Image (cartoon, helix red, strand yellow):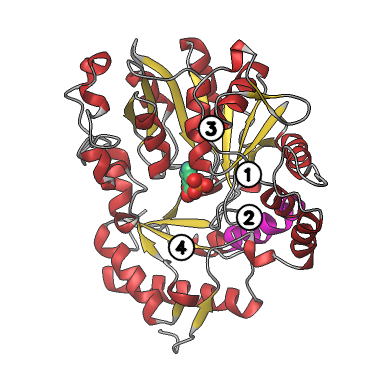
Amino acid sequence: MSSPNLQVLLPQEWPGALYYDQDELDAVTRVIKARSPFRFYGERPQQEADQFENEFAKHIGTEHCLGVSSGTAALQIALAAMGVGPGDEVLVPGYFWVSTVGAVVRSGAVPGLVDVDESFSMDPLDLRSKISERTKAVIIVHMGGVIGQVEKIVDICRDNGLFLLEDCAQATGAGKFGKMAGSFGDMGIFSFQLNKNITAGEGGAIVTNSRELYNKSFAIHDLGYYRNEKGRLNFDDPDGQLWGIGSRMNEITAAIMRVQLKKIDTILGSMREFKNELKSELKSWPWLKTRFVEDPEGDGGAFLKLIFPDRHISIDFIEGIMKRGISVKEGGGYPVHMTDWGLHIYSNIPSLVNKRSICGHHPVWELAENSWAKEREYSIGTLPVLDSYVERTVIFCIASRLENEQKNGIKKVFTDTCETINNIHNLLDHG
Ligand SMILES: Cc1ncc(COP(=O)(O)O)c(C=O)c1O
């Protein structure tokens, strides 16, 4: 029984920006009127970045927060603050964004890959088997706002004396049984780029409970030096005479982020409610699985992962929902098959698979300090569990603003497509 073509046109996957209104406009105006877009000094500084940092730390439940210019910068700063460098190994899951593994390589360290579990997050059992005397830190990545077996990973890191960094770029506002993403590890990083839960177009943050890691991050994010009470660089503090980058958060970003932070529960609540509703609807087909989420109430992301018995059926599903009228405004990228999810999976990052250098000199794998990692491979086949999921998983984006008509349209199209697939492939016995 197929539906007529419904033409369900969906908004793009820009959760925070879809909620922009007069409040963000007023926030920007406030900074412009004060003629003080720089956080450390100006005509009439508004201390937007200071206030954002306090508010964000409180939201996450950590002692410290540092606003920075992007999630990518935050990752690089955090690893540098942990002292990660040549000779070290950093373990990462195989499902991430290129920035995660890029930060490891840019630090001069060697990335080691860990397989995932049914939540598409790092598998603690595989992590335990991959730790070596070279391992200095572990990065877990809460992709699409879902937190995996983080408690076990915290224990493993503690038992082995390893730093734990949480990449929460896609998980602002997500949590697990009341504890927020970013508050489990030694450090957490966030992104406020356009595709993220809350956004200023660009921006990022680092959170930690460690005064020492905060201080180091502060210096590294701002040229390697601290600042005095007038906001001027302090050259005299020997602890601050490092080599840093220029990655400060500006006042306009901070002012927008303060407004967006107030909207986070509404934005996540809207995505979570419909995602969980759609998931219950799909339970009628035992052969169709969704990503395991231990605490659906803490689910903090737009992405719904649909796992099919095989690749063939997963492609049929995409074709089926598109044929029935699902489309995304302005050519948005969803639904997407995971094999087409470029730069998100270890095996589809050419610079990793081909072990490229940072900028034309010796790749990190050829540095004398990293000679133990010379033969390391990153090609497909390295992480069998993730490889198997990637082959048969479709990612669908639940936009943060959907009309009832759109929600009903999605449900109808999904249901009709699954029914057709069920009949064609005779899947009743598949569970
Ligand atoms: C998992 C993950 N880490 C890091 C980043 C980097 O953040 P940004 O784009 O702010 O540099 C992203 C952004 O897409 C991400 O998804």
Marks 3 and 4, Cα distance to the nearest angstrom? Answer: 24 Å
Q: Earlier in the sequence, mark 3 or mark 1?
A: 3
Q: Position of residue 303 (x, y in %)?
A: 50, 56
Q: Is residue 74 above or below residue 424?
A: above
For marks 1 and 4 on the same chain, the one whose residue lies earlier in the sequence = 1
Note whether 253 is above or below 283 in the view shown: above
Residue at image x 53%, y 57%?
Answer: 195
Q: CA distance from mark 4 to mark 2?
A: 24 Å
Q: Which circle marks residue 38 in the picture?
A: none
Say few, some or many: other residues with alpha carbon within 10 Å of mark 3 (under 14 / 14 to 19 / 20 or more).
Answer: many
User: Label 4 amino acid?
Assistant: Phe
Question: From mark 2 to mark 3, how far is it between C-alphas?
Answer: 21 Å
* Front label number (1 vs 2): 2
Tag 2 or tag 4, which sits nearer the N-term?
Answer: 2
Task: Find residue 86 and report its image quarter.
Answer: top left
Give how far across and how far down residue 213 sits, in percent: 60, 20
Q: Amino acid at mark 2?
A: Ala
Circle 1/circle 2 CB separation < 8 Å: no
